[in-house]
Image (tube, rainbow, N blue to C red):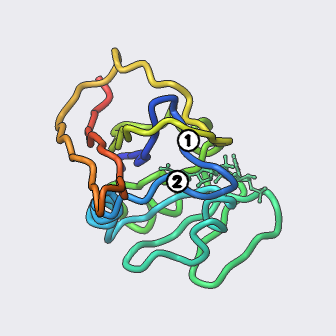
Amino acid sequence: MTISMIVAYGKNWEIGLNNQMLWHISEDFKNFKTITSGHHIMMGRKTFESIGKPLPNRTSIVLTRGDFKHEGVHTFDEVQKAFDFAKESGEEELFIIGGANIYATLFPYVDKMYLSEVDYEGEADAFLKPIDFSSWDLLEEKYYENIIKNGEMTSPSWTFRVYNKK
Ligand SMILES: NC(=O)c1ccc[n+]([C@@H]2O[C@H](COP(=O)([O-])OP(=O)(O)OC[C@H]3O[C@@H](n4cnc5c(N)ncnc54)[C@H](OP(=O)(O)O)[C@@H]3O)[C@@H](O)[C@H]2O)c1
């Protein structure tokens, strides 16, 4: 089973503030949906609470050490139990979808990364640990322009990249 991580981060590795995303990029959401649909997605309890519901067409796995439960969600108190569950369900590519705590803990297990680097700088309280790209091969790269409506930028520019571990 391939373990993949998918994340959008800013110029200073910002990923969130007050348990919310820092930008709204609808094309990035669409990409996220296309890439993760049909797969198991694994997240921390706080990220699940920020999304608020299981995402359709995906099997949601939530990591918690507490007694958190939610309909339509599989909860585990240990990473290995969650991996085993996905593997036993026949999953070929499991997606780690955040947040900061989970990305940091699970990074050593990650085989493939789907990264959206957003041209954004601002206040944040959740960050990705800076990635050393020297041990990763770039497979794919695409730049997306910002979106300006009525003279106001409604969506920043961003670059999507896919990497495989060397
Ligand atoms: N930009 C992006 O792509 C992106 C994606 C996802 C999230 N985010 C942002 O990230 C932020 C949330 O990140 P966060 O670090 O605060 O929280 P988080 O990683 O989503 O969740 C942390 C929680 O996960 C549980 N947990 C962590 N490690 C565990 C382990 N080894 N075993 C069992 N349970 C474990 C604990 O839950 P309990 O406390 O219940 O024990 C812990 O409090 C938000 O701002 C969100 O918007 C950004």
Which residue is at the front of the view, 81 or 67?
67
Q: Which mark is residue 103?
A: 1
Q: For the residue labelled by badge 2, is the local secondary structure a helix, a strand or a loop?
A: helix
Q: Quadrant of residue 126?
A: top right
| Residue ID at (61%, 74%) | 52
Name the outermost residue toward the right.
66
- Residue placed farthest to the front in the image? 151
**67 relative to 91 in the view: left or right:** right
Does mark 1's beta carbon lie closer than 8 Å to ligand 1? yes
Q: CA separation, marks 1 and 2?
A: 15 Å
Left or right of 17? Residue 130 is left
Q: Measuring from the top left, give residue 15's x and y in whole percent.
A: 54, 44
Tell me the tag on residue 117: none
Rendered position, 127 above or below 93: above
**Quick one: 90 or 60, which is closer to the camera?**
60
Kindly identify which residue carries mark 2. Answer: 83
Choose between 149 and 120: the one closer to the eye: 149
Where disc 1 sits, the SS reads helix
With respect to residue 71, does 127 lie above or below?
A: above
